[in-house]
Image: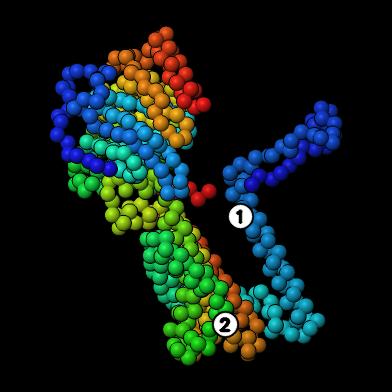
Amino acid sequence: MTSTTTTSPTPAASAPPAAAPHGGQGTLLDFRDVAMQFPNGTVALRGVDLTVDRGEFVTVVGPSGCGKSTLLRIASGLENASEGTAEVDTDRIGYVFQDATLLPWRNVEANVELLAELNGLGAGARRAAAAEAIELVGLAGFEKSLPKELSGGMRMRTSLARSLTLDPELFLFDEPFGALDEITRERLNDELLRLFVEKRFAGLFITHSVSEAVYLSTRVIVMSGRPGAIVGEFDVPFPMPRDPDIRFTPEFAELVGEVSHALREGHR
Amino acid sequence: MAVDTRVSAAEPGAVAVAPPRLSGPRPVRRALSPRAARTRNVVLPIVVFVALIGLGYLIALYYDRVRGLPFLVPYPHLVVDRIFLDADFRPDLLEALGNTALIAVIGLAIAIVLGVAWAVLMVQAKWIESALFPYAVVLQCIPILALVPLIGSLFGYEMPSRIIVTVMFALFPMVANTLFGLQSIDRGQRELFQLQGASRLTLLVKLRFPAALPSIFIGLRNSAGLSVIGAIVADQFFQRGRGGLGVLISVMNQRLNGAEMFAAIVVASALGVLVFVAFGWLRRLAIGRWYDAN
């Protein structure tokens, strides 16, 4: 991963971060012709051009095993692209995994403090950061609970809070709500949007669910089956903050239909 | 587990509605209340215990009256007498118990340190594990009896040799279970640390080691039991110096002191059980808060 230092300031706090033009100076993540071949010969990605700008929430949908997660792994530096350039213009990266990956021996508070602790923050600073993040995800009052005492949704909130303590500029989500029930999932989608509007991070979100993709993002990327390549791109025109009821409008349904169509085309 | 009780046609009320059929309804399990289950878990072992004591009396009676060899299988009350009441024998028994416990504790402590260190070393790299794990298995397979002359001539026939044998008995479960535990973390957890640039040491201290504790405690309990066995077996080979329960058992056997020998055997078994229970309790104390055994 080539990484240049952060220079551009965050966008003005007043403007709603809806459908910002991409490819401009505010680019946080810039993939050019990225391909990924694993040592065992599997080609996971080919020819991926992808940018994520400040103020954008980009969602990637695609069939299972198309290399969507590999995109995030390259963006975070867990893997190196075998071809092309992958630039990330910040080192404040949040990464939310498919599982909550909490440490079962730590209570909510201690789990949320973990990343700050690993980054060498002092006890006072990380306690403050954790308290704020716990408040943000609506877990106040559960600081002393252990992961085994929490529901799946609450565990995911804890995981989210843990990443929030890093105050990320780029937030990577690897199908974080895939294992949750529909109601919990929709509620967490709303909370995530609220956080997005409030904290102004750029998001790169992986999901199987087209309606989740359209609801959450300012732009939806559609990927083909393995090896994953980008086969479609849709701007989502709905303003932020989003009204949960837009899910029931004809415009929303139409866009979901278009994305689903592109997904089916790419899967052939 | 609940007692499996099929609703039979003979039960009142069932007769009229459900005549016996070949493919009847699924067996109905009568759920036991927790209290009843607890009572059962206490009462049944006591019943078995009483039955075993009764059997002991029968066998003792047979050897006493029919075979004329009363010292071979003593009456249970004589054994109890030797353990708790016999003022002549009790000091010997307590001293032997103390020596065995000491050897077991020292051996176990060494096995814990060596076992954890060995496992931590192996988890650092796959090639180290490939190089070293086979020897943990070999250790498990060595017939210790075959090494007795070697250990004896190298380290003498007293305490050091007993400790070495105890360590050999107790080491493998520590190595294997610690290694398994250290490897039990999932990829996401490891990558979470990796993304923050955590060092190997941080990963070990904050992730691998706490995650390994449930396994380590399983190893600990097995090793503790084996260290008691090891200490007693080692006694039988290395009989010089201050002897433990193993020496006492051999000596009483040679002297045909059946009751004393059985007393020593019972005390040795009690020590093994005590250690097993103690480490189970320690485990609950240490990790029961966040880890469910089942």
Question: How did the renderer colour the structure?
Answer: rainbow
Q: Nearer the viewer, residue A95 or B149?
A: A95
Name the residue tied to disc 2.
B145
> Which residue occupies the foreground of this view, A132 or B208?
B208
Structural distance between the alpha carbons of marks 2 and 1:
39 Å
Per the image, label 1 sits on a secondary structure element best described as helix
Q: Nearer the viewer, residue A231 or A183?
A: A231
Q: Position of residue B213 (x, y in %)?
A: 42, 56
Please report the residue visible at 35 percent of the width from the left and 32 percent of the height from the top: A48
Amino acid type at mark 1 = Val
Mark 2: amino acid:
Leu
Tell me the residue that label 1 is attached to: B42
> Which chain letter matches label 1?
B
Q: Quadrant of residue A19?
A: top left
Which badge, 2 or 1, is on the more N-terminal residue?
A: 1
Disc 2 element: helix
**Is B111 displayed left or right of B18 in the figure?**
left
Q: Position of residue A144 (x, y in %)?
A: 33, 40
- How packed mark 1 is, by other alpha carbons closer than 10 Å (few <14, some 14-19, many 20 or more), is few
Q: Residue visible at 53% across and 83% down? A: B147
Work out whether residue A14 can be spotted.
yes
Which chain is disc 2 placed on?
B
Dot 2 crowding, Cα within 10 Å, few <14, some 14–19, many 20+ = few
Which label was assigned to residue B272?
A: none
Q: Which is closer to the viewer, label 2 or label 1?
A: 2
> In which quadrant will I find the N terminus of chain A?
top left
Which residue is at 61% across, 47% downward? B37
Q: Residue furthest top?
A: A250
Foreground pick, A257 / B34: A257
* Residue contact between numbered discs 2 and 1, judged by CB atoms under 8 Å: no
Residue B237 higher or lower than B186, as above or below? below
At x 68% / y 61%, what residue is drawn? B48
